[in-house]
Amino acid sequence: MKPDNAHDDKGGDGPAGHRRRARYAGTHPRRFDQRYKELNPERYPEIQDHVRAQGRTPAGTHVPVMVNEVLDALRPAPGDVVADCTLGNGGHAAALLERIGPTGRLIGLDVDAAQLQRTGERLGGMIYVDANGRAGAAPPRISLHRCHFGGLGKVLGREGLDGFNVILADLGVSSMQLDDPARGFSYKYDGPLDMRMDDRLTRTAADLLGSLSVDELSNGLAELADEPDHVRIARAVVERRRVEPITRTRQLARLILTAKGRRPCAAGRPVMASSAERHPVARTFQALRMMVNDEMGGLEQFLRSAPYCLRGGGRMGIISFHSGEHRRVESAFNEAMRTGLFSVVSEQPVCPTPGEVRDNPRSRSARLYGAQKTP
């Protein structure tokens, strides 16, 4: 038998018109670009179940969280007009489409152009990239917009609609973004400190680390990620950038570990006390990503405008992932309830089941908040 890294996949040139795939060190692929089976699920369908059975998310894919709970809370019905405000890989969208049937319509939003293109091709949607009018007289069943969900009101007007029956926003980061080292979102891989969800943004994470003051960075780490060592990390960043620019994920991870007094191994990862312990650099990476993309500003804009995009009796659901998001969603929903804009809000958020957390560890911190507009 051949070892796992002796690939037989061929293509290109050679004696039979093919070439052998480049080998990787060890018996299993470690880098994102080496996981060719996970990145080609159509060719290797068995690999998806195999990887998920190990508690991992296959490279290049995203497992939508709490799909059944979302459907129960939002109750999409045949003929409904639904807005999936964070389309991503289209997992929630596919489930919603099944419920609304051929007479319903799905409007999808996302700022990631590459992901929007891939998902649009899979769902068969029409993609808008600007405010130009739709070609043809009949509206498509699926139309997709490269737009931040804070601009939902503009999309509503562009579509010529009076409102949505269902609005869903999943505030989590897509696994495709996290797992791709070239995007710079994850401390697990070495890559450029980019972290932009929308490549039209001008400032990267490296730019922020090179310009923020100690107070600005410290406040961001505390407010957006509850990082207990926010002052120490902020000072370490400012001191290091006087010597060299901080431009790589592994470089930042080592700096954070040193600032927190943690001992990194040779690859830059810390020696963990247990498998359940959260990675010591995770909070800093989370806060930096949120600053780059102004996630809190976008969320607050969405919370102000989205209720007015609902039809009377329409349902709205938001999946949030950390305390800063939880607080803002709860406060906005309760205020809308107090003023009579909403007639029903969830008393407690819905959490993923233990089985889902086991199968998809990234769902662990997800919380689903639901509300219904006053008829």
Image: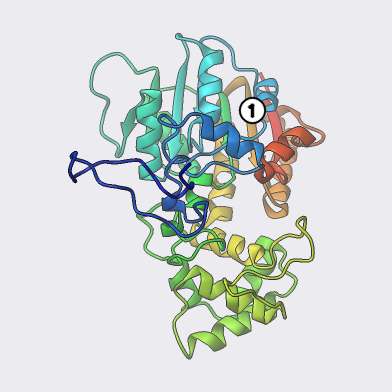
Tell me residue 354's x, y (percent).
79, 36
Quick check: 363 above or below 49?
A: below
Front residue of 68 and 26 = 26
Tell me residue 46's x, y (percent).
52, 30
Residue sitting at the far front: 1
Quick check: 213 above or below 326?
A: below
Residue at the spot 65% in from the left edge and 81% down from the top edge: 258
Residue sitting at the far bottom: 243
Residue under pointer 1: 67
Front residue of 58 and 369 = 58
Quick check: 138 above or below 273?
A: above
Tell me residue 93's x, y (percent).
51, 26
Q: Is residue 21 left or right of residue 74?
A: left
Query: What colour scheme has been applied to the protein in the rendered image?
Result: rainbow
Residue at the spot 55% in from the left edge and 54% down from the top edge: 295
Front residue of 247 and 169 = 247
Quarter of the view holding residue 148: top left
Residue at the spot 46% in from the left edge and 67% down from the top edge: 193
Residue at the spot 26% in from the left edge and 28% down from the top edge: 133
Quadrant of the snapshot with the C terminus: top right
Tell me residue 355's x, y (percent).
76, 33
Dot 1 alpha-carbon crowd within 10 angstroms: few under 14, some 14 to 19, many 20 or more = some
Q: How many tags in the picture?
A: 1
Q: Is residue 229 left or right of residue 311?
A: right
Residue sitting at the far right: 347
Front residue of 34 and 259 = 34
Q: Does dot 1 land on a helix, a strand or a loop? A: helix
Q: Is residue 309 visible?
A: no
Q: Is residue 370 left or right of residue 306?
A: right
Q: Amino acid at mark 1?
A: Val
Q: Is residue 9 visible?
A: yes
